[in-house]
Amino acid sequence: VDVNPRFLGCKTFEFTDEVAIFDLLDISLFHGWLCAPGSETAACIGSRSYNQLVEQVINWEVKLTTQSQRAAQEEAEAEAREGEGEKRAPPPP
Protein backbone atom coordinates (compact mmCIF):
# COMPACT_ATOMS: atom_id res chain seq x y z
CA VAL A 1 0.00 0.00 0.00
CA ASP A 2 1.42 3.36 -1.01
CA VAL A 3 0.87 5.82 1.83
CA ASN A 4 2.55 9.19 2.04
CA PRO A 5 3.24 10.27 5.65
CA ARG A 6 3.56 13.82 6.83
CA PHE A 7 5.92 14.48 9.71
CA LEU A 8 3.58 16.61 11.85
CA GLY A 9 2.14 13.71 13.83
CA CYS A 10 1.95 9.94 13.94
CA LYS A 11 -1.47 9.91 12.24
CA THR A 12 -0.85 12.50 9.52
CA PHE A 13 -0.84 11.27 5.92
CA GLU A 14 -1.43 12.83 2.54
CA PHE A 15 -4.96 11.89 1.56
CA THR A 16 -4.91 9.31 -1.23
CA ASP A 17 -7.20 6.55 -2.46
CA GLU A 18 -5.19 4.06 -0.42
CA VAL A 19 -5.64 6.08 2.77
CA ALA A 20 -9.34 6.55 1.98
CA ILE A 21 -9.86 2.78 2.09
CA PHE A 22 -8.52 2.64 5.64
CA ASP A 23 -10.66 5.63 6.55
CA LEU A 24 -13.81 3.99 5.15
CA LEU A 25 -13.08 0.80 7.09
CA ASP A 26 -12.40 2.85 10.26
CA ILE A 27 -8.84 1.48 10.51
CA SER A 28 -6.37 3.91 12.04
CA LEU A 29 -2.98 4.27 10.40
CA PHE A 30 0.08 5.29 12.38
CA HIS A 31 3.70 5.98 11.45
CA GLY A 32 6.81 6.71 13.49
CA TRP A 33 8.53 9.26 11.26
CA LEU A 34 8.36 12.29 13.52
CA CYS A 35 10.45 15.38 14.15
CA ALA A 36 10.83 17.13 17.46
CA PRO A 37 8.45 20.11 17.44
CA GLY A 38 10.31 23.39 17.21
CA SER A 39 13.49 21.72 15.95
CA GLU A 40 15.47 22.92 12.94
CA THR A 41 14.48 19.72 11.14
CA ALA A 42 10.80 20.34 11.80
CA ALA A 43 11.17 23.90 10.52
CA CYS A 44 12.83 22.65 7.31
CA ILE A 45 10.24 19.95 6.70
CA GLY A 46 7.19 22.02 7.61
CA SER A 47 3.97 20.35 6.45
CA ARG A 48 5.57 18.60 3.48
CA SER A 49 4.87 14.94 2.92
CA TYR A 50 7.48 12.26 2.36
CA ASN A 51 6.92 12.34 -1.42
CA GLN A 52 7.21 16.14 -1.52
CA LEU A 53 10.52 15.94 0.36
CA VAL A 54 11.86 13.27 -2.00
CA GLU A 55 10.94 15.47 -4.98
CA GLN A 56 12.67 18.45 -3.35
CA VAL A 57 15.85 16.45 -2.74
CA ILE A 58 15.84 15.28 -6.36
CA ASN A 59 15.38 18.87 -7.56
CA TRP A 60 18.30 20.00 -5.37
CA GLU A 61 20.48 17.19 -6.73
CA VAL A 62 19.63 18.16 -10.32
CA LYS A 63 20.33 21.82 -9.56
CA LEU A 64 23.66 21.06 -7.85
CA THR A 65 24.72 18.73 -10.67
CA THR A 66 23.79 21.33 -13.29
CA GLN A 67 25.68 24.06 -11.43
CA SER A 68 28.71 21.81 -11.02
CA GLN A 69 28.70 20.88 -14.71
CA ARG A 70 28.31 24.52 -15.71
CA ALA A 71 31.22 25.56 -13.46
CA ALA A 72 33.42 22.79 -14.87
CA GLN A 73 32.54 23.83 -18.42
CA GLU A 74 33.29 27.50 -17.71
CA GLU A 75 36.61 26.53 -16.12
CA ALA A 76 37.55 24.39 -19.12
CA GLU A 77 36.62 27.22 -21.50
CA ALA A 78 38.70 29.70 -19.48
CA GLU A 79 41.69 27.34 -19.52
CA ALA A 80 41.28 26.87 -23.28
CA ARG A 81 41.24 30.65 -23.78
CA GLU A 82 44.36 31.02 -21.62
CA GLY A 83 46.07 28.27 -23.61
CA GLU A 84 45.24 30.00 -26.90
CA GLY A 85 46.63 33.28 -25.56
CA GLU A 86 49.89 31.61 -24.58
CA LYS A 87 50.23 30.12 -28.07
CA ARG A 88 49.78 33.52 -29.72
CA ALA A 89 52.04 35.46 -27.39
CA PRO A 90 55.37 36.38 -28.93
CA PRO A 91 58.38 34.62 -27.47
CA PRO A 92 60.22 36.56 -24.78
CA PRO A 93 63.35 38.42 -26.00
Image (cartoon, grey):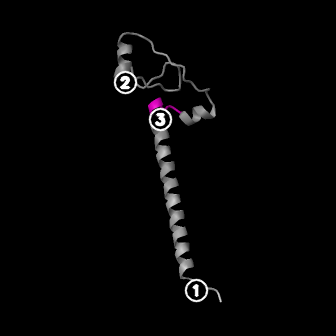
Q: Amino acid at mark 2?
A: Thr
Q: Position of residue 13 (x, y in %)?
A: 45, 23
Q: Amino acid at mark 1?
A: Pro
Q: Position of residue 15 (x, y in %)?
A: 39, 24
Q: Earlier in the sequence, mark 3 or mark 1?
A: 3
Q: Is residue 31 above or below residue 69?
A: above
Q: Residue at x 59, y 27 (%)?
A: 35
74 versus 22 height, above or below? below
Is 47 within the magenta? yes
Separation of marks 3 and 1 at Cα, in angstroms: 56 Å
Determine the CA span between mark 3 and mark 2: 17 Å
Q: Mark 1 — residue?
A: 90
Query: In the figure, is residue 15 to the left or right of 91?
Result: left
Q: Which residue is mark 2?
A: 16
Q: Is 40 left, or right, of 87 in this rendering? A: right
Q: Nearer the viewer, mark 1 or mark 2?
A: 1
Which residue does the numbered mark 3 point to in the structure image? 54
24 and 5: which is toward the camera = 5
**Number of numbered discs on residues:** 3
Magenta span of residues: 46-53
Badge 2 density bin: few <14, some 14–19, many ≥20, Cα 10 Å: few
Which secondary structure, mark 1? loop
Whole-percent x, y for residue 75 in the image: 54, 63
At 36% across and 20% down in the image, what residue appears?
A: 18
Q: Does the magenta portion include 50?
A: yes
Q: What is the quadrant of residue 27 in the picture? A: top left
- The N terminus lies in quadrant: top left
Image height of 90 relative to 80, above or below: below
Mark sitting on residue 18: none
Q: Say which label, 3 or 2, has the lower sequence index.
A: 2
Work out whether 15 lies above or below 55. Answer: above
